[in-house]
Image (cartoon, helix red, strand yellow):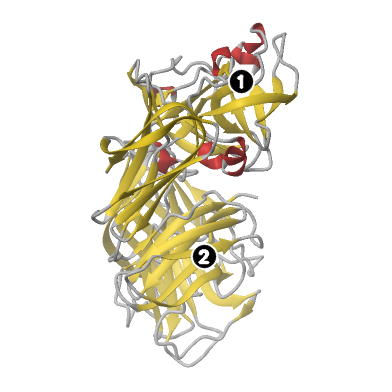
Amino acid sequence: MKTRLFISSLLLVFIFGVSALTVFGQTPASATWNLFGADSLSPTTTVGNISGQTVSHGDTLAIKDMTGSAPNSPLPGVTKSMRWYPSINGTAVSWGNETGKNENRWIQFAATPKSGNSFNVDSISIWLGAGGTTAHIRANLYFSTDPTFATRTLLNPADTGVVPYRDSLQHYGYHVNVSVKDGQSLYFRVYPWYDGSPSTSKYVFTQAVYIGGNTSSAVTYPKVSIGVARGMVNDTVTVTGVVFSPNYQTVNRSYYIWDGTGGLDLFSYGLTSPDLKMGDSVVVTGKILLYNGLTEIQPLSDANIILAGSNAALPKPEIITVGNFNTNGENYESHLVGFTRLTKLSGTWPTSKSSATLKLTDGKDTLTVYIDSDMGLNSSPEPTWPADVIGVGSQYASTGIGGYQLLPRFITDFLPAGTVPVELTSFTAKAAQKSVILSWETATELNNSGFKVERSADAKAFYTIAFVKGNGTTTEKSVYTFSDNNLSNGNYYYRLKQIDFDGTSKYSNIVQVNVNTVPSVFSLGQNYPNPFNPETAIEFTVDKSGFTTLKVFNSLGQEVASLFNGQAAPGQSYKIDFNASRLSSGIYFYQLQQGSNIQTHKMTLLK
């Protein structure tokens, strides 16, 4: 039996059994409360569920009897209770001679605020009792907002637990102070244990749980860069960016926005949201989602798209090779990119209001170019090939990541061959002790005076640190390097400003590097890529020597992989590759632990 109770005011109440339900006033729309239990006719059904997902049997607690009387009930008019005992597949498990809780045996209650609300909890209380004519039942009580329950707060003494009265119900109440945000849940667990002689006839009564607090609709969402937001799939965030494409649809809104750290598709159903123009600066609060592999932000409402300015500078195209785009498409998704000297392999330029797919080549690799009917390019004559082509890196793959393609915006995105002066094929940064080594390559150069090397501490304010002379005009590959020395620990961002002899210029993409000569913090990094299929990498550092573990859990808190299990030391960064080919798609949690230090992050497997 799974019961959902909607309760009003400062206290929300769960009453176990089949009789009276006492409620107090709190707006039903503010919070959703889930009580998980098993039907008395199906005693093998387990509890300990998280947000409605049923756990496997194991050593969780199953209901023995829903119809038993409640001895000395403290609640007027309530005469029924629930009786709990440990069982596996309906068979009683002998328990006793225990000195503390069993981590695999618990009763759990979960509460989740409705979207757009947060819940501020100030108290938790429960009615407990011991059955089977014994005074040796103990229980430890915890709460947590961590679904893996690796991080939790103990409400009562660890050694003795609470001591329920024999064949009676006793109230235990605690003051707490925790905020359950939108997208989180509050988990309350009871860990019963028995310090008497082993027995299969000892059990615990529960009758009511009171969780007090108040809800608020003033939910604050994290403000992050677009580059960070791209890794926060299914989270709600606030980003700021500049619109650098027209609307790609006629019945919905679909724009691409950019902030220097990355790009996103800003997608909104219908046409009620603002009609944005290229160069508009927007502040968007919405959920990060994947649609056929494309990372997008969907605003919570039309009011969550705020126009902050207009006529902002548009991003310069990143000139790359077709091979680089096809191999590293995720790195260029929602970026403005350009290619030089492409010729057509296949496809028909649209002459009516229809879409078309062209296959273009640079002589070595093939680029997919999608001409969207809504862009009106069918009214323009076909470009003369070869041509330089600019557009938005995108993808449309119903099976997940892949299917990268270029979306031109206007007919002016098709340029005469040689219009783009320098074909920058790569730009990388690598930390080496207290230095950063920058490397970049060009496939061709036209009137290239050279490159200003610019550095920033926040990816926003850049300043010039060097000038590297170019090779003028050449069709040969050129390789450049520059070493930025004597740096302190921290994050650094670099970009190149390529300058022609006539003074015109354009910027490269931004690269980030971390200088950390001696890692001195206990830190677990976000896996990359995320989402992933089926491989991803996880990095961590520790601040002291000691036995360290890195484990992966599913959404039920079950361990599914152990990635590191040994001694780790400060002074180096650990990078662990994780292959999840044997796992199914879904949300997973990975946890780093060294002694009392614990950090947990979420990752998404998409197959």
Image disc number at residue 552: 2
Query: Which numbered dot is residue 143?
Result: none
> How far separated are the C-alphas under marks 2 and 1?
49 Å
Ranked by sequence position, the earlier of labels 2 and 1 is: 1
Tell me the quarter of the picture where residue 546 sits.
Answer: bottom left
Above or below, 458 relative to 413: below
Q: Is residue 345 left or right of residue 507?
A: right
The kind of secondary structure element at disc 1 is strand
Asked whether the beta carbons under mark 2 and mark 1 sit within 8 Å of each other, the answer is no
- Check disc 2 and give the amino acid type: Val
Residue found 62% across the figure and 55% down from its top: 534
Q: Quadrant of residue 177?
A: bottom left
Q: Between 455 and 335, which is closer to the camera in this rendering? A: 455
Instruction: Look at the numbered disc 2 and give the secondary structure of its residue.
Output: strand
Amino acid type, residue under disc 1 in the picture: Ala
Where 421 sits versus 378, above or below?
below
Q: Which residue is mark 1?
A: 387
